[in-house]
Image (tube, rainbow, N blue to C red):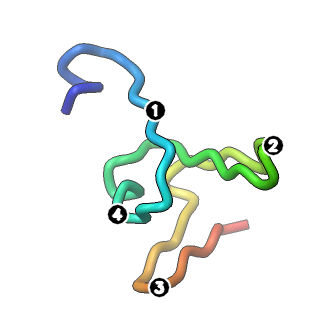
Amino acid sequence: RLSAERKVTVISATHDFKMLNVSDRVVWIRDGTVDKIENREELSISIGKIDTRH
């Protein structure tokens, strides 16, 4: 809502996968380096598991 109302980018660093539901893009970080960047639509989410659609 904040992003839409004020037209700002919100960056959240979390391990809480519930945030995926309100995210447009996901940046995967491994060992302190950006591993990949994906659009939310490219992810398949189910309980206990997240798969990328490649």
Q: Say what amino acid the circle numbered 1 marks.
A: Ile
Regarding mark 4 in the picture, which secondary structure is present there? helix
Circle 1 residue: 11
Q: Which residue is mark 3?
A: 48
Res 54 → quadrant: bottom right
Q: Earlier in the sequence, mark 3 or mark 1?
A: 1
Marks 2/4 in contact by CB < 8 Å: the verdict is no
The amino acid pointed to by label 2 is Thr
Of helix, strand and loop, which one carries label 1? loop
Q: Is residue 38 left or right of residue 5?
A: right
**Quadrant housing residue 2:** top left
Location of mark 2 (residue)? 33
- Residue 23 position, x and y percent, is 40, 46
Task: For label 3, count other residues whose C-alpha is less than 10 Å away and answer few (under 14), some (14-19) or many (20+).
Answer: few
Question: Distance from label 4 to label 1 (Cα)?
Answer: 15 Å
Dot 1 or dot 2: first in sequence order is 1
Disc 4 or 1, which lies upstream in sequence? 1
Q: Could you tell me which residue is drawn at 63 percent across and 49 percent down?
A: 38
- Disc 3 + disc 1, Cβ < 8 Å: no
Q: Cα distance, mark 3 to mark 2?
A: 24 Å
Residue 32 to residue 18: above or below: above
Residue 10: name its quadrant.
top left
Q: CA distance from mark 2 to mark 4?
A: 23 Å
Element at badge 3?
Answer: loop
Quarter that holds the N terminus: top left
Relative placement, left or right, of 13 versus 23 is: right
The residue indicated by pointer 4 is 18
Residue at left 41%, top 57%?
A: 20
